[in-house]
Amino acid sequence: MHTPSLPATPGRPVASPRRAIHRSPLYIAPHEGEFLCDVDVLFDEHGHVYYADERPEDRDIDGILWERWGGVPSGPVAMAHHHPARQREVMDAGPKCGICGGEPDRDERGVLWLLHVDADTRATLTFPGDITTATPAVCRTDAFHALQACEVLQEGFIAVRVQEAEVVGVRGTVYSATEPPLLEQVVRLDDDAINRVVARQLMRQLRDAELDETTLATAGRRTRTRSGGATLDVPGPTWG
Ligand SMILES: [Zn+2]
């Protein structure tokens, strides 16, 4: 598996490399007209998951099985959720801004990431530090828009700058032949469980992320303590 530095991500083609980027209120958010398909998950003789009616597009270049969604991107968007194919597209490509699908903001400190973080988690963070996240990078314009429009971000956020953000795994549902499926699991690419996961989000590790307290300083900052946050077997905090 490649561990590339920004901006290039050789060896992991984007989901739709020649696809036109469409302006959307939030590019990676699912629309009302889109839905998760009900697909039977089975195990092959190696204990690896597959779909009963699997299609080539159900897997990525690494052979990981992904959630299959249907419908069309029409109607209101669910701001707090990710459409798997579009989240993977912007996370795998470059990376791209998760809101407009264009180039993220970049300066001498690295690429801009805007992350929701509750006050409890914020208190545990030290910088520079490693952060594993499903949240894509962001351009400066959309970072300001997001802070104005997203109540979740307004409850607490950090902006960080990152020089290196390798793809380290996926988040999804891990299946077992004997136990109920486990939801919302982060599985690293070198973990054997990668063969039993149906992925929903691509995860990047933001290496040595530095706190950026200047770029969005004029956007205002409100914080409110919220409980939650999962403990995951990955280096550094994970959220988003
Ligand atoms: Zn943008």
Image (cartoon, rainbow, N blue to C red):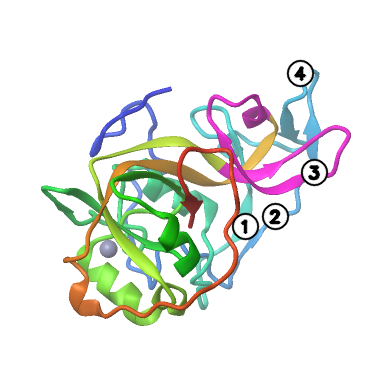
How many numbered marks are there?
Answer: 4
Residues drawn in magenta: 171-195
Residue at 75% x, 53% y: name it: 38
- Which of the 4 image quarters holds residue 165? top left
The residue that disc 4 covers is: 46
- Which of the 4 image quarters holds residue 123? bottom left
- Badge 2 density bin: few <14, some 14–19, many ≥20, Cα 10 Å: few
* The stretch drawn in magenta includes residue 191: yes
Q: Where is residue 43 in the image (x, y as percent from the top left)?
A: 80, 29
234 left or right of 20? right
Q: Give the distance between the C-alpha atoms of the residues marked 4 and 1, in whole angstroms.
A: 29 Å
Marks 3/2 in contact by CB < 8 Å: the verdict is: no
The residue that disc 3 covers is: 40
- Mark positioned earlier in the residue sequence (3 or 1): 3
Residue at 50% x, 74% y: name it: 225
Q: Give the distance between the C-alpha atoms of the residues marked 4 and 3, in whole angstroms.
A: 17 Å
- 139 or 185: nearer the viewer: 185
- Mark positioned earlier in the residue sequence (2 or 1): 2
Marks 3/1 in contact by CB < 8 Å: the verdict is: no
**Amino acid on which disc 4 is placed:** His
- Badge 4 density bin: few <14, some 14–19, many ≥20, Cα 10 Å: few
- Indicate the quadrant containing the N terminus: top left, top right, bottom left or bottom right: top left
Q: What secondary structure is found at the residue carrying circle 4?
A: loop
The residue that disc 2 covers is: 37
- Mark positioned earlier in the residue sequence (4 or 1): 4
The response on whether ligand 1 sits within 8 Å of label 4 is: no
**Amino acid on which disc 1 is placed:** Gly
The residue that disc 1 covers is: 70
Q: Where is residue 19 in the image (x, y as percent from the top left)?
A: 35, 49
Q: Give the distance between the C-alpha atoms of the residues marked 3 and 1, in whole angstroms.
A: 15 Å
